[in-house]
Amino acid sequence: MAKGHRAQIKRERNEKIDKRPSAKLTYARIPVQKACFVLDAIRGKDVRTALGIVTYNPRYASSVIKKLLQSAVANAENNNNLQADHLYVAECWAGSGPIMKRIHPRAQGRAYRILRRTSNIKVVLDEK
């Protein structure tokens, strides 16, 4: 290999990194399906509307996603010098995290397995 080969590979990899402000929550104690109900409601909306939606949504996932959205806005203001009025939710998704397996005792000495699912949630903002 040439001497500058590794540095060239790193340079090319760093150019592909997404520069948009974002926030990520790992191991959230919410199943992916329940988190996606709230994420589908805010995808593509501007930040002010999205915060209003998650504030008045009765689901538990909305309180967690509200904190995540506020974190993404703070990242945009502090790290990228962007104004919150010009931001919208470009992408948001939830992927499955590790599953905690629990045992629930049943009749006649049997045991049923309970799966406590977790999710990894990411919110990406962009400027209008």
Image (cartoon, helix red, strand yellow):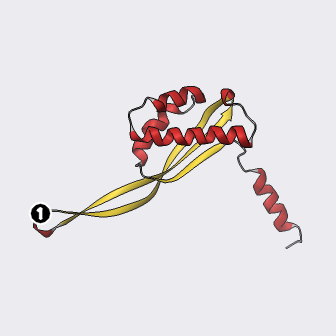
Residue at the outermost bottom position: 1
22 or 63: nearer the eye?
Answer: 63
Residue displayed at 53% across by 41% down: 67
In which image quadrant can residue 82 be found?
A: top right
Instruction: Give the residue at x 80% y 62%.
Output: 9
> Residue 38: which quarter of the image?
top left
Q: Which residue is mark 1?
A: 107
Residue 45 in sight: yes
Check the image and report above or below for 128 versus 26: above
SS label for mark 1: helix
**Above or below for 13 versus 62:** below
Whole-percent x and y of residue 86?
Answer: 69, 27
Quadrant where the C terminus sits is: top right
Total numbered circles? 1
5, above or below 125, in the image: below
- Please give left or right for residue 122 compared with residue 8 in the image: left
Spot occupied by residue 88 in the image (x, y as percentages of width and height): 62, 31
Vertically, is 125 above or below 95? above
- Residue at x-position 72% and y-position 41%: 78
Q: Position of residue 18 (x, y in %)?
A: 70, 46
How far from the left and from the top, in percent, is residue 37? 42, 37
Q: Residue at x 88, y 67 (%)?
A: 4
Residue 36 appears in the picture as rendered: no
Which three-letter amino acid code belongs to the residue tagged 1? Ala
